[in-house]
Amino acid sequence: MADQSRAKIFNASILVLISILGLQLFWLQIVNKDQFQELSKDNTLRDVRTLPARGAIYDRNGTLLVDNEPAYIVTLTPRYFDESKTALLSQLLGIDDTVVTARLKKAAEWNSYRPSPSFRNADFNVFSRIRENAYLLPGVGHEISQRRRYVSEARAAHALGYMREITQDELDVYRKGENERRYRQGDLTGKTGIERQYEPQLRGTPGSAFRIINVYGIDVKSYQDGSQDRAPTGGLDIHLALDENVQALAESLFVNKRGAAVALDVATGGVIAMVSMPDFDSAVFSTVIDRDIWSRFAEDEDTPLYNRATMNRMPPGSTWKPFMALLALSEGYIEPDGPASTVFCPGYHPVGKGLIFRCLGEHGALDVREALMHSCNTFFFEMARRMDVNTFRRYANQFGFGRRVPTDIAEQTPGLIPDSAYFNRIDPRWNIGYSMSLGVGQGDMGVTPLQLARYTAAIANGGTLHTPHLVAFIRNPETGEQIRPEGLSESKNIPIDERYFAIVREGMRRAMEEGTGYSAQIPGIPSGGKTGTAQAPGNRIDHSVFVMFAPFDDPQIAIAVQCENAGPGTACAAPIASLMAEQYLKGYLPASAELQVRLGYALSAVSQDLTKPDEE
C-alpha cells in the first residue's frame, strides 16, 4: 500500500509539472506570441546604421573645396565582446591593450547592445585583418564610413572649419527626439566654421540595414534579402561666396605673418575671402589625433585655432578716418564746401595744459577730401573734439561696430566701442584727450577685420549695410533644388545722406591716387582706400591696417587687412589687399615688373615681436 501511495504521489507530481510546462508553453506561444517573437527577432537581428554621404562644399564658381573619401571603422558591441580576446584585438589593431579596454568601457557607457564606432580611420590592411578574424572576435564589427577630403589649393581653414568626435554633452542632446538615430558615440560632427554652422544640412540622415547575427554577435547575412532596409539620405551641398583663387593668393601672401584679411562682395555681403594666419590643416582633424598633437595646436603661442578675421580686436588706426568724416558731415561738425569746410593743420593739435597731439605733417587748411587724402591727424582730432562720445558710439553701432555681426560665422567678438559710461567706469577723471584719440582710430576701442570690411563695403555702395555670409546657397544634389540659408538678417540702410558717402569715397580715391595708398593702386583700375597704423600695446611694433574698395565707379569688392606687428599700413596690409582685389577683378595677376615690386612689398613684410626703437 505504501508503494502504491508513493507511485500515485509521483504520478501526480509529474502530471502537475507537465501541466505547468504546458501552461507556460501556452502562455509563451499563444497568449504572448507577438511579444516574444519580437524579442526573438531582437536576438537574431541587428539594425545596422548606414551612414549618409556628407554634403560637399564648393566655392562661388563651383570649384570643389571639400568632399569625402572612404574611412574604415572597427566597432565594439560590449554585450557580445569576449574580454579574453582583448590581446588579440589590440595586436591586430597595433595598439596597447589599455586603449581597447578604455574604448570598450566608453562603448558600454553609451549602449552595451549597439555597435559603437570605437576605432576610426583604421588602415585598410588592419581593417582587412579584423574582418578575416571576425569568427575569433565576437562583438567586434566594422563600418565603411567616410572622412573629409580637402581638394583645394586654398585651405580656408577658419571658414570651412573642422570635424571632431562628438562629445558626451552633444550626444546627450542629440539622443533626444528625432535625432536619436543620427548620432552615436564615436561619430564626427562639425566643431567650427561651416562644418559646425551647417551641420544639420551637411549631415544627412542615416539609413538602416537589417542583418542576421548569431549567438556570438557575428554578422551572418542580410535579413529578407534587404527588403526591409532603408537607404540613407545624403547631406546637402554647400555653395560658398568664397573665391578659391583669391583665398589661395591671400594665404600665400601671409606666409610668416600673423593677421587676417576679409574680402566682401559689395553688392551682397558674400565673403569672397576670409584669411586668418597662422592657420591649420583641417585634414588633420579628419583622423583621430592624439593628445600631444592637440596640445601643440592649443598651446601654440601664435594661436592657429584662433580666428583672427572675426575675433582679432584691435584699434583700426587711420582706416577709421572715413567713418569720422561721415559722422562729422552728418552731424554738421564740418561743412562739405564753403568757408566752414576747412580745418587748419600746423602739424599738431593742442589738447590743453601744454599737451599737443602731433600730426603726420604740416598740411595747412584742408577740407574733408584733402584730410582723407593726406591722412591728416589734426583734422580728425578736431572732429573728435567737436563730437559727443555717445554720438560716436551711436554712429559706430549703425555701421555694425561694437556688436556681433549677424552672419553664419559663429566664432566672433563684438569689439569695443566706448561711450561716456565706459570711460566713467574705467577712469572717472577721464578728459577730452580720451575721446580725441578715437578720432584717429586709437585709444580704447577695438574692431575686427570682418567689421572693417563690412563698413568699407557700406561706404562703397552708398550706405547699405549687408549681412556678411559665407554661404551663397544650399543645394540638394538629388533634385537640384537651391535653398537660401536661414537666419541671416536683412540688409539695412545707414541713415546718412548719400552725398556725404560720395564725398568720403572721393577722399579715399585721392588717398589711393595722390596720398598714402599710392603704392597700392591696381594698374588700370581706380579704387578707394585708406591706410592705417594701429598702436600695439607694450611699446611693440605697430600693426599694419588697410581698407579698400574697387573699382571706384562700380565697386564690386571691399577688403580689410590687418598684419600684426608689421609696421605702417603701406608695409604689409595695403599690398596684400591690392593684390587680392586685382586677382578677383581680373581673374589673374598679369606678369609685369610692377607686379613683382608689389609682390615684393607683400611678401617681405613679416610679423615681429620686437619692440620699437627708443625715440629721441
Image (cartoon, grey):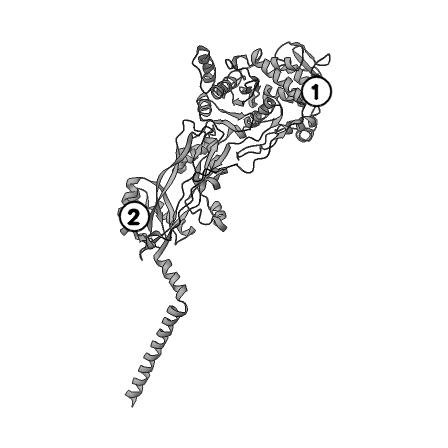
* The one of 218 and 315 positioned closer to us in this rendering: 218
Residues under numbered marks 1 and 2 in contact, where contact means CB atoms less than 8 Å apart: no
On the image, the x and y values in percent for residue 70 come to 35, 39
Q: Secondary structure at mark 1?
A: helix
**What separation in Å lies between label 1 and label 2 (alpha carbons)?**
77 Å
Q: Secondary structure at mark 2?
A: helix
Q: Residues within 10 Å of mark 2 (few under 14, many from 20)?
A: some
Left or right? Give the position of 89 relative to 606: left
Say what amino acid the circle numbered 1 marks: Arg
Can you say whether 466 is above or below 614 in the image? below
**Between marks 1 and 2 in the image, the one whose residue lies nearer the viewer:** 1
The quarter of the image holding the N terminus is: bottom left
Furthest residue toward right? 339
Q: How many marks?
A: 2
Residue position for label 1: 385
Q: Residue at x 41, y 48 (%)?
A: 207
On the image, the x and y values in percent for residue 92 come to 28, 44
Q: Residues within 10 Å of mark 1 (few under 14, many from 20)?
A: many
Residue position for label 2: 87
Can you say whether 369 is above or below 15 in the image? above
Residue 210 in view? yes
On the image, the x and y values in percent for residue 105 come to 39, 50
Say what amino acid the circle numbered 2 marks: Ala
Among numbered discs 1 and 2, the one appearing first in the sequence:
2
On the image, the x and y values in percent for residue 423 come to 67, 28
* The one of 291 and 208 positioned closer to us in this rendering: 208
Can you say whether 220 is above or below 328 in the image? below
Left or right? Give the position of 294 relative to 469: left
Residue 281 in view? no
Q: Quadrant of residue 604?
A: top left
